[in-house]
Image (cartoon, helix red, strand yellow):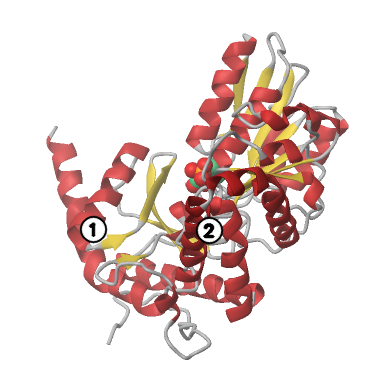
Amino acid sequence: MWSPVSETEVTTAPRPLLLADGRPADRAWSLDPALKHLNHGSFGAVPLVAQERQELLRVEMERSPVVWFPALPQRLAAARIELADFLRVPAGDLALVPNASAGASVVYAALALRPGGEIVVTDHGYGAVTMGAERLARRWGGRVRTARVPLDADADQAYEAVVAEVGDATELVVVDQITSATARRLPVERIGAEAGRRGIPVLVDGAHAPGLLDAPLADATYDFWTGNLHKWGCAPRGTAALVARGPLRERLYPLIDSWAAADPFPDRFDTQGTIDATAYLAAPTSLAFVERTWGWPAARRYMDDLADYGASVIGSALGADTTVEVGMPVPGMRLVRLPDGLAADRIEADALRDRVALELGVEAAFTSFDGIGYMRLSAHVYNTAADYEYFAEECVPVLGKWARENSGKRSAQ
Ligand SMILES: Cc1ncc(COP(=O)(O)O)c(C=O)c1O
């Protein structure tokens, strides 16, 4: 029986979710039972029912490719309607792209040359997306301006920090709806409204939003939003949405030039040469599975309660000063501060992730922000309180040992 190490109060463990036939929820996935899976957020996890659906679609494709491919755009258009319904946006605003990175690349490729133009990003931005913004700014002969948003900044402070970087030379604002390393929200609606007032396009990186937020585009006035369905939505990998409104969207083209180029947005994204589009077609199966089994609102509540519990048991095992109050919390994700000596930068955080998987048998996410290392918890329906209790009991002592060893090495240098 697990018991807390420190005196910190531990929140109540939510009861594990079950499948309709009474089996534990994780039986609906094919995750290796020999490992613990505490990092849904990075790459998602696909339920068996959607894997099977995708496999059936592949069989159909392989049986008669010459029938399959010409009919594909119509089938993708039908899938888009279901995915748009999940996100509560009109299907005519939503194009399918393989991932959020691709969604950002499509937007970057679409913007006209702005000599000397500046792009505003934040220091919470996803590295790959920010790198794309930097490349675009270089092409323009301009530069990226990075808004510094303190981890605990509330909505007003975060808004002020971003808007303070917006000036006459700003040609694009790129801002995360839910940040990756720091698992917090940013006030994208207000930032979008202000940029819109000034006539500056905004790209919202909503990679984590589908499934975690009920209606991620409600109250949105921004031009471009991209989000992954293969993260919290559990869709097969390579399924993301690019939602675009306003006149600029007619400039958006798929990264692969293809036959539908003369079609309007978003239809032209339904034809991208010869690709395996079965992930897009199977994606609604994942969304429907969660809806049918628990309902998304109940699933989200469970993820959030479990992430709370996980943060409290792991935080309590780590000892004092591990609680992290981010300014605008996210359902289902939490940060726990690591001891000094662990994950002080991204390279160290990734190395820790790999070592924890290899030596401790746990898939976990470690991140860093401002030189401090964090464990980022992201709980999904297949996780249970026991996963976090295991980590607290078996892995936290090892993390403590590694931290002391690393700190010792550093002070000896
Ligand atoms: C905020 C954010 N943007 C973009 C991405 C990239 O997602 P993908 O690798 O699916 O393109 C991620 C992935 O974790 C993310 O968290």
Task: Identify the image quadrant of the N terminus.
Answer: bottom left
Which of labels 1 and 2 is toward the front?
Answer: 2
Q: Look at the numbered discs 1 and 2 and tell me whether their residues touch, using CB distance below 8 Å.
A: no
Residue drawn 68% across and 45% down? 73
Cα separation between marks 1 and 2: 44 Å
Residue drawn 68% across and 53% down? 75
* Direction left: furthest residue: 412
For residue 79, say whether it is visible. yes
Q: Give the residue at mark 2.
A: 57
Amino acid carrying mark 2 in the image:
Leu
Task: Identify the image quadrant of the C terminus.
Answer: top left
- Which sits earlier in the primary sequence, circle 1 or circle 2? 2
Secondary structure category for the residue under label 2: helix
Q: Quadrant of residue 150?
A: top right
Q: Nearer the viewer, residue 278 or 94?
A: 278
Q: Which mark is residue 399?
A: 1
Residue 147 in the image: x percent, y percent? 61, 32
Mark 2 close to ligand 1, CB under 8 Å: no
Residue 121 in the image: x percent, y percent? 61, 31
Q: Nearer the viewer, residue 259 or 23?
A: 259
Secondary structure category for the residue under label 1: helix
Q: Nearer the viewer, residue 257 or 353?
A: 257
In the figure, is residue 31 to the left or right of 382?
left
For residue 324, say whether it is visible. no
Amino acid carrying mark 1 in the image:
Leu
For residue 295, above or below residue 287: below
Q: Which mark is residue 31?
A: none
